[in-house]
Amino acid sequence: MCHHFHLSLQSGSTDTLIRMNRRYTAEEFEEVTKRLRKAYSDVILTTDIIVGFPGETDEEFEETFNFLKKIKFFKMHVFKYSIRNGTKAATMPNQVPGDIKELRSKRLLAFSDENELEYIKNYIGKEVKVLFEEKDGEYYKGHTANYIMVKVKSPIDITEQMLTVKIKNVQGLELEGDVN
């Protein structure tokens, strides 16, 4: 079983979640993340966030940002709310302007990259099991059990093999290592 869970939060503001017609609060969501982290020492949590949902104030966005800092997701998929005709949200008051949605999106994406980089740097010097899935240029790439991308150079085809890799550094947002 992969120790990677994708939990679709949408917003860290309970008021925004209510407007989105979600059936959970930010506090209930946080409790789920705590249980998963208690059950799996190497768990990775990822999420989806929507910025600029109708009525999202600066204060609600900051509440979401602070909630995300507290939860510390490995990665966040950030989407700018867009009107879909026929939905209740399309006719809601206080539609958020596009430039504000863009700024909020960029801020969360940068924060997501910071979290991911900080997390994967902890793997330098460690050994991990990797299931290799593809060749990309001079590298073979695959994922750890908790879904971190690892790449290695190998003179032989190692696709579809699970091998132990000693992590030596980070390139971009990927780990690089050598097969043991």
Image (cartoon, rainbow, N blue to C red):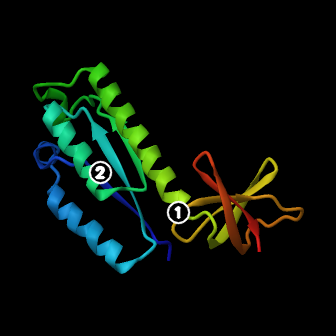
Q: Where in the figure is residue 107, as x and y percent of width and height?
A: 36, 34
Residue in front for this viewpoint, 78 or 150: 150
Toward the viewer: 118 or 130?
Answer: 118
Task: Specify which label sits upstream in the sequence, 1 or 2.
Answer: 2
Looking at the image, can residue 24 be seen?
no
Query: Residue 132 — which label?
Result: none
Q: Residue 64 location in percent, x, y?
A: 22, 45
Instruction: Say which amino acid is labelled 2.
Output: Lys
> Which residue sits furthest bottom?
39
Quadrant showing the C terminus: bottom right
Q: Residue at x 29, y 40 (%)?
A: 50
Position of residue 77 measured from the top left corner of the image (x, y, whole percent): 40, 45
Residue marked by disc 1: 122
Q: Position of residue 16 (x, y in %)?
A: 15, 43
Farthest residue toward the right? 155
* Res 59 quadrant in image: top left
Q: Is residue 159 left or right of residue 156?
A: left
Q: Which residue is mark 2?
A: 69
- From the viewer's perspective, tell me whether residue 142 is left or right of residue 17: right
Closer to the camera in the image, 158 or 170:
170
Q: Residues within 10 Å of mark 1 (few under 14, many from 20)?
A: few
- Residue at 15% x, 39% y is 60
Q: Is residue 80 visible?
A: yes
Q: CA distance from mark 1 to mark 2?
A: 18 Å
Locate residue 158: give its quadrant: bottom right
**For residue 85, above or below residue 42:** above
Q: Residue at x 29, y 50 (%)?
A: 68
